Image: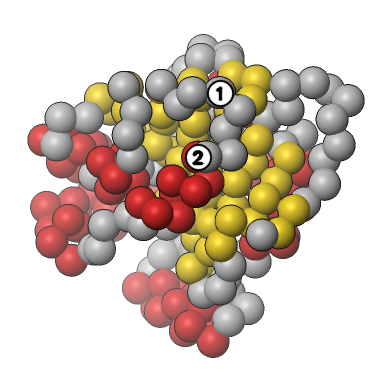
Amino acid sequence: MVGVSDVSTFDRFARVYDLVMPGADATQLGRALERSERPVDRLLDLGGGTGRAARALDANQRIVLDAARGMLVRARDHGLATIQGDASRLPVAPASVDAVTIVDALHHVHGWDSLFEEVFRVLRPGGVLAISDFDPTTLLGRLLVTGEHLIGFESQFVSPQVLCDHLERVGFETIVVDDGFGYTVAGVVPKRENKSRSTQRE
C-alpha cells in the first residue's frame, strides 16, 4: 500500500502535477513493453496518478489505478479509465491484462512482494511489467532520497538488481532495460513454468 502521507500530498498536488512534472519516457517504457510475448491490448498503469505513463503508450485500453482521488480526476480529464484502489489488492480479474506499468511510483509503495504477487496474478501469460524508478546508489539518487524525506514522503528506493531479485522471487523473468539514476526494469510472466528465471542485462 502507499504511505498515507504520500497519498494526501498527491491529492493536494494534483491540480498542478502535470504542469511541473515531465512526461514519462515513452522510449524506455516502449523498450520494456517490447519484451511482452503477447500483443499489448489492455494496459494497467499502477500508481499512475494523472496518467503520464498511460498517455505515453499505445494500447487499446489504458486504465490508471491510484490511491489519490485528486490525481484520478486529472487522469479522467485526459480521457483515461480510472480505478481508485490499493495496489497490493488489485480489483482486477486474474490473467486479464497484457501489461502493467509502475512509473516513478514504486518508491511510494510499501509491501512490494504483495504488490508483485498481485501484478503476476492479473497479467496474462507472456505479459510484461515495466517499472521505471530511481537508483539510490547513484549520487543523484542519494540526493533524491534526502529530498523526498525532507518533503515528508515515506519513500523507499532500491537499485535495479535488488528490484530484479524481488521480481524473480515472485516468478517474473527480468530484464534491466536501462540503468543509471533513472532506470527501467521489465518483468515477464513466463508462458511455461519450466522456463528459467535468469536476469538479463542489455
Tell me how far mark 2 sits from mark 1, CA to CA.
10 Å
Where disc 1 sits, the SS reads loop
Q: How far across and how far down the image is residue 52, in percent?
A: 28, 48
Q: How far across and how far down the image is residue 184, in percent?
A: 54, 57
Which numbered dot is residue 38? 1
The total of numbered circles placed on residues is 2
Q: How far across and how far down the image is residue 151, in percent?
A: 35, 73
Ranked by sequence position, the earlier of labels 2 and 1 is: 2
Q: Amino acid at mark 2?
A: Leu
Mark 2, residue position: 33
Q: Amino acid at mark 1?
A: Arg
Q: Quadrant of the C terminus?
A: bottom right
Q: Residue at x 77, y 51 (%)?
A: 199
Q: Residue at x 41, y 64 (%)?
A: 153
Question: Is residue 47 in view?
Answer: yes
Q: Residue at x 33, y 55 (%)?
A: 24
Q: Nearer the viewer, residue 53 or 48?
A: 53
Q: Residue at x 34, y 28 (%)?
A: 59
Asked which quadrant contains residue 149, the reply is bottom left
Q: In the rendered view, tell whether residue 171 sits above or below residue 141.
A: above
